[in-house]
Image: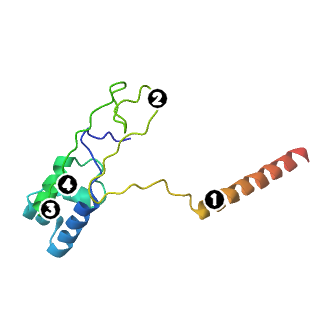
Amino acid sequence: MRKQRADAIFMTWETISALQTAFERAGSSLTAFAASLGLSPGLVSDVLHGRHGHVSLAAENRVRHALGLQPLGTYQVPPCRTCGQVHVAPDCQGKPVAAVVVLAPGERVRGPRPRPAWLDAAVRNLRELEEKARARREKGVNS
């Protein structure tokens, strides 16, 4: 599992979309496009290919500045007096509470996706095949 830097965030859709649009309009190579913005080709490549989970807020703001977008701000949230974590309430008093998640403009919360029906059907088919194979082996041993 890849370690993330302490200031890592997932980039906002606005930044990603603006960079993709600018790259398509430029019609040049990725290296030339990155150089024209004053950004590293690695950073631009990571963003364009969806590998931006490790990109820091400062790096995203450099991309936003190069594209003429407003920089994203940071938020100071005081930690809980009891446990030191960030909660909705100022003090959890040792009780479990929901954590605070600050979303950047344009970001949204996505819940877990349901398992696709084809996956359940495939698992059922495999189990049926295993049961048939086990029954044949047992029949062959008992004969």
Residues at discs 1 and 3 in contact (Cβ within 8 Å):
no
Residue 43's mark? 4
Residues at discs 2 and 1 in contact (Cβ within 8 Å):
no
Among the 4 quarters of the image, the one containing residue 70: bottom left
Q: In 3D space, how far apart are the residues under numbered discs 4 and 2 (Cα atoms)?
A: 41 Å
Mark 3: give few (<14), some (14-19) or many (20+) Cα within 10 Å. Answer: some
Ranked by sequence position, the earlier of labels 2 and 1 is 2
Residue 69's mark? 3
Q: Amino acid at mark 4?
A: Leu
Residue at image coords 14%, 62%: 69
Residue at image coords 32%, 57%: 107
Q: Amino acid at mark 2?
A: Lys
Please state the horizontal and vertical placement of residue 13, each as a whole percent of the image. 28, 61
Among the 4 quarters of the image, the one containing residue 101: top left
Q: Amino acid at mark 3?
A: Leu
Q: Which tag is nearer the camera, tag 4 or tag 3? A: 3
Q: Label 2: which residue? A: 95
